[in-house]
Image (tube, rainbow, N blue to C red):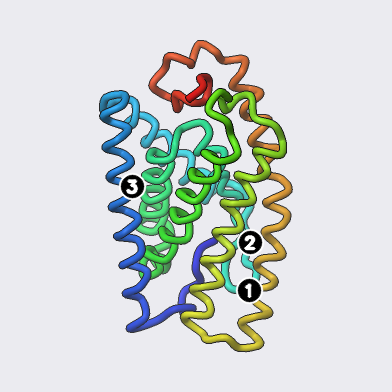
């Protein structure tokens, strides 16, 4: 989902930094809530793990340019279910930053837009999770329909934000509409695949009940709210 260099330029770049700063502030609040709930070590460990996984996903998993951006298998809903919202958000921010600093410096001007495109759907996903998953259900017991709702929320959010940046930077023109449509269509495949990955990971987690008391996973993974 990297915003391509040149899509938004010059004086318009400020909006990405503004939205990213707002979401960063919300991430700090969420992280502080996690620290109050479980102490500092568990959120810190999960954030480090999320950062390593996000960086690996960006660098190792297949990704290809389509239309106005790139299609990535980010596994945002998977990270959320295993590690929690705040560590996932921190991992997304730091994973992107490490990639930009050391492997793709041409992406740094778009960093604010990329962070916004990943974090805004993540927090929307957290809201939807609270609606579609009952308080008495641990994440390891999710059904396919619930996993699909989470994945669709996250991926649709990514497509919506990429479309917004494209129209903000290039205007609503026929060429831009076509490019955005191609990008959105490509993400339908991700929406189809990601819930299956979520359920496979959750099924694997069921066999690792010893992690239930560990600080390396979100408490809700094995426990009801």
Disc marking residue 180: 1
Quarter of the image where one finds residue 28:
top left
Sequence-wise, the earlier of marks 2 and 1 is 2
Look at the numbered discs 3 and 2 and tell me whether their residues touch, using CB distance below 8 Å. no
Q: CA distance from mark 3 to mark 1?
A: 28 Å
Disc marking residue 86: none
* Residue at the disc numbered 2: 64
Q: CA distance from mark 2 to mark 1?
A: 15 Å
6 relative to 26, above or below? below
| Spot occupied by residue 108 in the image (x, y as percentages of width and height) | 37, 65
Sequence-wise, the earlier of marks 3 and 2 is 3
65 relative to 40, above or below? below
In front: label 3 or label 1? 3
Q: Residue at x 73, y 54 (%)?
A: 189
Location of the N terminus by quadrant is bottom right
Q: CA distance from mark 3 to mark 2?
A: 29 Å
What kind of element bears circle 3? helix
Disc marking residue 27: 3
Is residue 146 shown left or right of residue 7?
A: right
């Amino acid at each position: 989902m990297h915003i391509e260099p040149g899509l938004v330029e010059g004086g318009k770049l400020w909006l990405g930094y503004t939205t990213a700063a707002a979401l960063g502030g919300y991430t700090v609040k969420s992280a502080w809530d996690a620290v109050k709930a479980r102490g500092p070590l568990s959120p810190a460990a999960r954030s480090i793990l999320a950062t390593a996984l996000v960086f690996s996903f960006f660098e190792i998993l297949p990704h290809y340019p389509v239309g106005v951006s790139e299609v990535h298998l980010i596994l945002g809903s998977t990270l959320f279910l295993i590690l929690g919202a705040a560590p996932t958000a921190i991992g997304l921010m730091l994973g992107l930053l490490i990639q930009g600093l050391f492997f793709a410096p041409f992406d740094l001007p778009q960093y604010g837009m990329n962070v916004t495109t990943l974090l805004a759907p993540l927090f929307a996903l957290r809201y939807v999770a609270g609606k579609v998953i009952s308080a008495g259900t641990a994440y390891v017991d999710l059904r396919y329909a619930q996993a699909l709702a989470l994945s669709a929320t996250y991926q649709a959010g990514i497509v919506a934000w990429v479309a917004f940046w494209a129209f903000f930077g290039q205007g609503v023109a026929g060429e831009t509409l076509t490019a955005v449509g191609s990008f959105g269509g490509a993400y339908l495949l991700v929406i189809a695949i990601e819930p299956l990955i979520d359920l496979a990971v959750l099924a694997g987690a069921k066999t690792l009940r010893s992690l239930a008391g560990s600080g390396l996973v979100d408490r809700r993974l094995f426990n009801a709210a």
